[in-house]
Image (cartoon, rainbow, N blue to C red):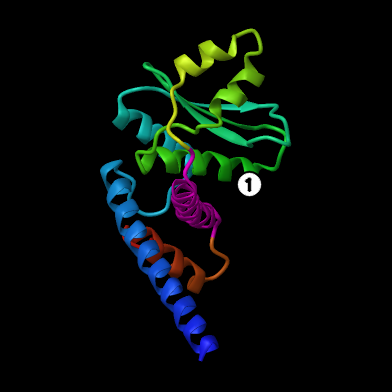
Amino acid sequence: MTRVRNGVARLGHRLRRERELWALRRRLRRELDNLRLHGPTDMATVAARLAERRGRPLRLLPMALDPRGPSGLWIATGKADYVCYQQHTTQAHQEHIIAHEIGHMLATHHPDPGANELLGQLLPDLPPELIARLLPREHHDDAREREAEDIATLLLERAEVARSLRTPARSRRAARAQAALEDDPGWV
């Protein structure tokens, strides 16, 4: 009987998670529509449109980060947003890091609470007290990280389709599939 209850509980958890993901997809689609991003797109375009909508620059900064620490972070200042990401990794990983940090912005999270430590590594001449004052943070939240990760996955799905659509089709059937995906902005 306990096995049945555990199985039902796991199934209930999976169903709730699926509902959450579909709700997140709908919310992300609306957000991307607000950014005038219809259909597949790449991360550079997402960043440019997000910066435009926020009315402030969004700078993507590759950096040599400590591999034992965070691989990226979002720093929001009064005048600009900065996404710092590991430069010593694959391009696919870099895009994922950028998508994750943009996910935090799209979800209207506050910047990463680990930013103080990472900023201390990047700017060792600044005293820790000054960094803490300049970058106040909320408590780290796993649900927020999961949400940013889910958004990153959805954004990267769009980016991958955008790349595949730019590749010339090798057959008429493939060309029809490309045309269908290009024409349907609600595919994600």
Q: Residue furthest front?
A: 2
Q: Position of residue 99 (x, y in %)?
A: 50, 43
Which residue occupies 43% across, 35% down? 47
Q: Residue furthest bottom?
A: 1
Which residue occupies 50% across, 83% down? 7
Position of the C terminus, as image quadrant, is: bottom left
Which residue occupies 44% across, 28% down? 137
User: In the displayed structure, does residue 147 sit left or right of residue 61?
Assistant: left
The question of residue 141 being in magenta is answered with yes
The question of residue 132 being in magenta is answered with no
Residue type, label 1: Ala
Q: How many marks?
A: 1
Work out whether 99 lies above or below 184: above
Q: Which residues are magenta?
A: 140-168
Q: Position of residue 14 (x, y in %)?
A: 45, 73
Asked which quadrant contains residue 96, the reply is top right
> Does residue 184 show up?
no
Q: Which residue is mark 1?
A: 92
Label 1: how many Cα within 10 Å (few below 14, some 14–19, many 20+)? few
- The chief SS type of the magenta part is helix
Q: Secondary structure at mark 1?
A: helix
Work out whether 28 lies above or below 170: above
Which residue occupies 32% across, 61% down? 23
